Image (tube, rainbow, N blue to C red):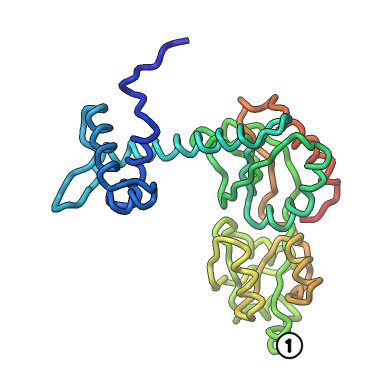
Amino acid sequence: MMSRQRRYLPSIGQLAAFEAVQRTGSTTAAARALDLSQGTVSRLVASLETQLGRPLFLRQNKRLLPTPAGIDYARDIAAALDAIERASMRTAADLGGGALSLAILPAFGTRWLAPRLGGFLAAHPGVTINLSTRIRPIDFAAERFDAMIYFGSGDAPDAGHMPLFDERVTACAAPHLLARRPIAAPDDLADLQLFQLETRPRAWDKWFAGQGAAPLPVSGMMFDQFALMIEAAIAGLGVALLPHYIAQAEIAAGRLTPVLEPAVAGTGSYWLAWPMIRETYRPLIALRDWLAAEVLPGDVA
């Protein structure tokens, strides 16, 4: 194995201090975040600059401004520190069966995966799953996860894939909104706010097609997560287009009411994906097998 050059392997203390200063904008704030003295943080950053042979910050009127090289270096170091932290957590949590770092969608994790996860853990008592939420698909080259569950077309680059299920969607509104504004046909939505999700820009067009109607111009609040959209719909601010597995729970609880035909085809599917280097990792194989059994043909999402 090729030996590593000590000059290019700064200490964790140096890297943590540099990343904290770049992130917070000052040695004072970085010192508070790291529970160190300001002088210690300054010395760690200065020693890192000396070791690399170039400045990472410009000192101007007691302010530290990152150089272009410092900005690029910080991006790489933050990713490396994240990877080290996850590897340490995985090792510390390993009960003998292995640990799996899994990136999941927030609503999918809360509403679909979490209620079922006990079955997986009971069947694989030695496996630990560490969950992190991501709104969009991750880049396995940049973020060191063992797998992710994401919404899309099964096209994550340089990854293995297993389809879970197609998304089907149901339009929902608060009962008190529908009592005031009954909806008997798609055109009745014309003057209402139609909530939109950033990751599904064509969702309403597909829903109108599923109702056998031409799409209406969509005007409404934009959200990055379903949780906020649901609360806005419950408050009567507009109509939410939700994955059916989420809509079902809100409808059963009486918080929302379905609008027109429920569970129509959405714009994509849910996928499990993993970096090819983890293809034969035992905890990943266990998760794949469990999901394949858990997702039955005909499941509606």
Horizontal side of residue 164 vs 69, given as left or right: right
* Above-or-below relation of 181 to 85: below
Residue 288 quadrant: top right
Q: In front: 5, or 168?
A: 5
Q: Tell me which residue sits at (79%, 50%) in the image.
A: 116
Instruction: Give the labeled residue for mark 1.
Output: 179
Residue 121 quadrant: top right
Say which amino acid is labelled 1: Ala
Residue 137 quadrant: top right
The image shows residue 176 at horizontal and vertical percentages of 71, 85
The image shows residue 196 at horizontal and vertical percentages of 58, 66
Q: From this viewpoint, which residue is outermost toward the left?
A: 61
Horizontal side of residue 265 vs 215, given as left or right: right
Q: Tell me which residue sits at (83%, 52%) in the image.
A: 299
The image shows residue 30 at horizontal and vertical percentages of 33, 49
Label 1 environment density (alpha carbons within 10 Å; few <14, some 14–19, many ≥20): few
Q: Tell me which residue sits at (38%, 39%) in the image.
A: 16
Q: From this viewpoint, which residue is outermost toward the top?
A: 1
Horizontal side of residue 116 vs 56, given as left or right: right
Q: Total number of numbered labels?
A: 1
